Amino acid sequence: MAKRKISAITIGELELPTGEIVACDPLITGLSRPAFSRKVKPGRYPVTLLQAQGCVAAAVLRFSPGLPMRWELATFVPDRAPVYKSEFLEFIVDDAVASFMDKSVLTLMSDQQELDDYLADVACTIDRFCIDSPIEGNPLNVAMFDTGYGDGSYRSFWGLNAAGEPLLLMTDFEVLENADGRESNQTN
């Protein structure tokens, strides 16, 4: 990572009481975004941002130590027919801010308009990243962070161990070319 000038910063721990993770732009898709198909063990997990070229290149949610043995595209649980072909393979960012949250936060958002407004206020005022607890006295929180060069459609990937269990979830914000380490002149 040092050779590619990538730095890592841990921004805090995300509370996942259901183990169902949602990744979305909290300003436009929070209420309608389904959770990822794969669940993790409920708990608190560190969120790390990988920064390169002055941007957030990736957001990583770490569940266990170790290096992934393989990668798997993180898909979403469809709650209806897709509007566009890759809808359940990526999420759209229209405000240059993305988030990780537990699915239970969406329940609160749909029940409490003030929570939705609160998240919008926080997302509009963050300086690159934050982890925020929108309800005083409630451990639920939301990790919010800038997205690479801004708006776009972004995909997430599960880093799996040899047994196929998730070690991490990573959202790639398309800042690093050849992020898998291949030289650009090599063929597959």
Image (cartoon, helix red, strand yellow):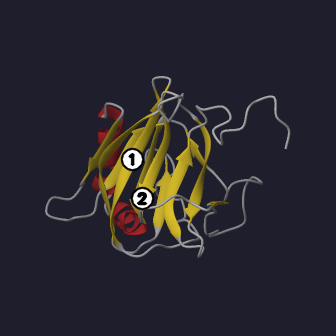
As displayed, is residue 168 above or below residue 8?
A: below
Q: How crowded is mark 1: few (under 14 residues within 10 Å), some or many (20 or more)?
A: some
Image coordinates for residue 134, horizontal then vertical, percent: 24, 54
81 and 18: which is toward the camera: 18
At a point 54% along the width and 37% down the height, the residue shown is 94
**For this view, does 70 lie left or right of residue 115?**
right
Residue 18 rendering spot, x and y as whole percentages? 39, 75
What residue does disc 1 label? 48
Tag 1, which secondary structure?
Answer: strand
- Could you say which is closer to the camera, residue 105 or residue 11? 11
Name the residue beneath numbered marker 2: 62
**Which residue ends up furthest to the top in the rendered image?**
54
Quadrant of the image containing the C terminus: top right
The image shows a total of numbered marks equal to 2
Tell me, yes or no, whether the two marked residues, 2 and 1, touch with CB atoms within 8 Å. Answer: yes
Q: Residue at x 41, y 42 (%)?
A: 49
The image quadrant that residue 136 belongs to is bottom left
**Of the residues under marks 2 and 1, which one precedes in the sequence?**
1
Quarter of the figure with residue 70: bottom right
Q: Which residue lies furthest to the front in this view?
A: 3
Q: Please name the amino acid that badge 2 sits on.
A: Arg
- The structure residue drawn at horizontal position 46% and vertical position 64%, both measured from the top left corner, is 21
Give how far apart the Cα atoms at labels 2 and 1 are.
Answer: 8 Å
Give 173 or 178, whichever is nearer the viewer: 178
Q: Is residue 130 above or below residue 72?
A: above
Disc 1 residue type? Thr
Q: In this view, does 64 lie to the left or right of 78?
A: left
Report x, y in % for residue 4: 54, 29
